[in-house]
Amino acid sequence: MNRFKTLILLATLTALLLWAGQALGGRNGLAIAMFFALVMNFASYWFSDKIVLRMYRAQEIAPGAHPWLFGAVRELALRANLPMPRVYIVPEDAPNAFATGRDPSHAAVAVTEGLLRLLPREEVEAVLAHELGHIKNRDTLVMTVAATLAGALSMLANMAMWSSMLGGRSQDDEEGGHPLAGLLGVLIAPIAATLIQMAISRSREFIADADAARISGNPAALASALRRIETWSARIPMQAATPATAHLMIANPFSAHGLTKLFSTHPPTAERVERLEAMALRGYAILG
């Protein structure tokens, strides 16, 4: 099912890239966008994890550099029957975490410095278990592909806007982009963001939460971690976060208010906490 969703996501965003290229430069723009789309589709599958990790300036750690964190990931991966993922630390004060990689054999887990500093160890372990849940369900392929292509689409939108503002269309070029290409290009970014939010279903977070409860055996710790992350995120903004990659995080790094909640990449924290606390009352055995 995830492979089918990935194909739909790739096809939709590729179509938008081609449309934007034609709006920007006519037939020439369409040809350029087609080449660009082919390159990005290839890169998003094979290299999207590396691109996302670089965007967040994540640093891979060796077993001896941070023994507790590395050991916790290794223990949880064994419980989840997963290969040991690579472990990264993101130089951000805001507490958050994400997983990436095209499959469980090429996966990585990244946590921010703020998460390690502001949360107790049992809550960090619960967060790690949540990210391993995404890896186990192979959500990371769709998530990283979405982040990479959304970023490419936003870049093309900016190109269209500046081309229109600077008079990039030649009067002799009958096949050139329409004068409204710049305006349409600006509108592409929110459209792309909406598509990403639709493609990355909120239900995946609920499923990963449930898997985290089974892997860690401590749903109450994850519920507490989500509350703590939401509280701190409102105080400490995540500097490297972008709307195109917000869905990768365990909690939305941007505060959602009013109508923006309708397009949030994550379910309401209160609802996630309520489900986790219900799991804690029922009791969850450790997966393994």
Image (tube, rainbow, N blue to C red):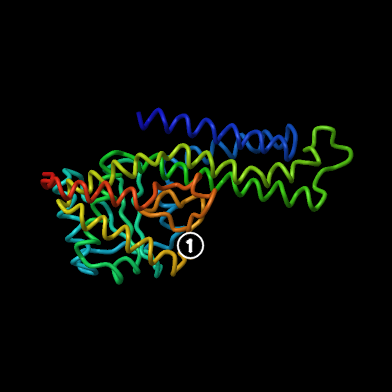
| Residue 139 higher or lower than 121, as above or below | above
Which residue occupies the foreground of this view, 11 or 34? 11
Answer with left or right where residue 184 lies relative to residue 34: right
Across and down, in percent, residue 43 comes to 47, 42
Q: Residue at x 28, y 44 (%)?
A: 208
Residue 235: image quadrant is bottom left
Q: Report the residue marked by disc 1.
A: 240
Answer with left or right where residue 27 lies relative to residue 134: right
Answer with left or right where residue 265 lies relative to residue 155: left
Quarter holding the C terminus?
A: top left
Amino acid type, label 1: Ala
Q: Residue at x 44, y 69 (%)?
A: 236
Answer with left or right where residue 220 lies relative to residue 192: left
SS for callout 1: loop
Which residue occupies the foreground of this view, 178 or 47? 178
Quarter holding the N terminus?
A: top left
Q: Residue at x 23, y 61 (%)?
A: 123
